[in-house]
Image (cartoon, grey):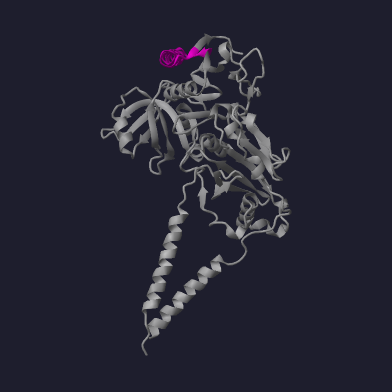
Amino acid sequence: MYKVRKMMVILLSGVCVLILVGWGEKSVELLNDKPLIDLKTAIKEVPLGKQGNTLIIENHEKSSDEIVTIDQNENIPSKEIGGSQNKVEYKIIIKDTTVTYNGTIHTDMQSLKNKIASDCDDMEIKIRLIDDFAESHVYKETLAILEQLHKENNLEYQEDTRYD
Amino acid sequence: MHINKQPFFLFFLLLLAILLCGFGFSKSEMIMDTEQNVVYQNFSIDKVLTDFEADKASAKTQYNNCRIVICGKVSEITKNSKAVLVSAVNGNQEGTIKCSFSDKDLTAYAKTLSQGDFVKVYGKFSVSIIGGNLNIDVSKIEKTVVNTTIDTCYSLLNGKTIDRESLSVRTLADKKITYYLPNDWSAVEYNIIENDLGVIEGYQYRLNEISQSAAVQPESFFVCYFDNQLLKFSGDKSKTDLIERSIIANILNKKAESLAKFPIKKIDTYYGAKYQYYQDAYRDNLGQGYHVEFAFQKVGMDGILVYLYVYHDANHIDDIMFLMRLLEVQ
């Protein structure tokens, strides 16, 4: 009998603790009720062709749905107006042993190859390979990747020693 | 007097089931989990060895328990292939770092290595208590031809690397918070107050607008600073959990009482930051649903840093991990 009562007391105490833990304030009041972030305004679907720094060129001499990508930001040195056939041009800059592709350093050649191949699949690109006092073995390896992608994916590229 | 004990046991079993269910639900998968997407800092092995030779105590403070990437030359492979000793690239610096494998695949890979190979090693650096030997608990090892690393670079296990020095800088909270913008992000940056997107200080990054992503479905990352002056009562400043609940409720337009368990997860990261997480869903006017993840980081007693990720497909989680890893709070 005594044991049963003791067990009841323990159980009820446990339930009380659980209730008390969940009790109390759930929030504090903010200065005003305006949304800190208005998700309805901020989260909107973007019409095709209006993403980011991509503009639709309205030029009657060209096809009306022709899209080129332009660089609106000087901090992205590796992207610029495409040359022939409005291809987007990306730079690979090799300085010493550091390989920078489209502003991202790649220390793993396989990841560099995968990234370029993926970009080739997504859009028409051409690559400008810039030798900024590159280590020869790194330059050769990068060049080999471009040659391979040229054969496999018809990637257009050109070598350049001029850094601008 | 006879008392039927059966109801008590049933009640006890019910209570136990409720508790177990609670534990089960609390194990949520967070995409912004910094422990699942570790960012490794690049170091030159020559510099690490030089630093330890110059001042062991100071170097131990700097490197111990850091997640690092080093490139070095294999000087020895243990007989069971469970470790390799890696030495300086140029061979001018004495000493080695023992790179140990606990994973079978890594051990198998180690068997393909030979003395003199250049390798890149990702892992957790430590200094052994006895003998002060330098160790790396390896997460990934690979042969490489690029034999140098830059100390300002950070890498993920998938090989993606960024150089902090080449990134644009943003500040919040009167320069108490500094962070670095991944490439391409400045083109899709929107100041929240200036663009009437809300009243909190910070920026929205519409990641689906980055031209290369070619994604139509919204994917946005917000970096914001909640100043405690936005509280109605200044006495509430110390109630961090309640403030964070109120921020979530305000943004998701819900009642704080109706929110699920908060925080869903707490992480004391390997780089010193402490986050509290919350996970929910958001449905827009067209009925399109999105995953919503919050991460909160306290900024002294003055305010709270709020990360908010709204996504359907998390295409830019790598960049988000770099941003969170490199963010500095004074």
Q: Is residue B215 above or below residue B24?
A: above
Quadrant in the picture for residue B138: top left
Asked whether residue A94 appears in the rendered view, the answer is no
Q: Position of residue A157 (x, y in %)?
A: 50, 12
Q: In the rendered view, would you say A101 is above or below B253?
A: above
Q: Is residue B236 magenta?
A: no
Q: Is residue B312 left or right of residue B174?
A: left
Q: Is residue A139 magenta?
A: yes
**Would residue B150 be seen by someone viewing this image from the given angle?**
yes
Relative to A39, is A15 above or below? below
- Observer-nearest residue: A56 or B93? A56
Q: Percent from the top left, x then y, of residue A129?
A: 52, 13
Q: Position of residue B52 (x, y in %)?
A: 47, 34
Of residues B49 and B231, the one nearer the viewer is: B231
The location of residue B252, given as percent across then percent down, is 62, 50
* Rendered residue at 61%/18% (across/down): A80
Q: Quadrant of the N terminus of chain A?
A: bottom left
- Which quarter of the rendering shows the C terminus of chain A? top right
Q: Nearer the viewer, residue B146 or B283?
A: B283
| Stretch in magenta | A129-156
